[in-house]
Image (spheres, rainbow, N blue to C red):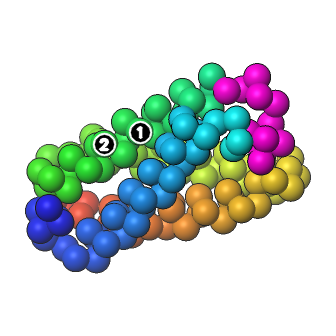
Amino acid sequence: MLAKMNDNVAALVLGIYLLGIIMYVVQLIFMTEVWLKGEEIDVSAITVARVLGAAWLGLGIGVVLSFLNGPDGQKTFFTSLLVAQVATWLAILHSHFIENLPKTGDDAAIVTVLTILLLLGWFRIKDRL
């Protein structure tokens, strides 16, 4: 499955990135109330959190399919994934540093690492997209 990437480093970092997506999808879809309470967000945001989880589920499936079929010709998908990840990263950094929401510190760190992993993987495979 990973052989289709033709780049072990890209496969490794994108695999770790996929694990991060899976973690957030599980939290946002299946553990929504617990996650919201942990972030000190009112449970009335359950629908929004689950919709966000569903969106990331779709992006995660796209990453899995790129492992199965190779990244060739997937420029539009990876550009969309990169835009979604960077927008998420900027939003969480804004919440943490500008709005001073103390519960976003761990997510800010995790999303920063995931963004770096995606960027590293993207730069490794961008010539094949």
Give the magenta part as a residue range.
36-46
Residue 61: numbered disc: 2
The amino acid sitting under disc 2 is: Ile
Q: Is residue 129 visible?
A: no
**Relative depth, front residue between 99 and 68:** 68
Q: Position of residue 50 (x, y in %)?
A: 57, 30
Among the 4 quarters of the image, the one containing residue 49: top right
* Residue at x 14% of width, y 46% of height: 73
| Residue 19 vertical position relative to residue 29 in the rendered view, above or below | below
Instruction: Verify CB contact (< 8 Å) between mark 2 and mark 1.
Output: yes
Residue 57: numbered disc: 1
The amino acid sitting under disc 1 is: Leu
Q: Position of residue 99 (x, y in %)?
A: 86, 47
Q: Considering the image in quadrants, where does the N terminus appear?
A: bottom left
| Residue 23 vertical position relative to residue 51 in the rendered view, above or below | below
Task: Point out the residue furthest to the bottom here.
Answer: 9
- In the picture, measured across the screen, residue 19 lies left or right of residue 5, that is right
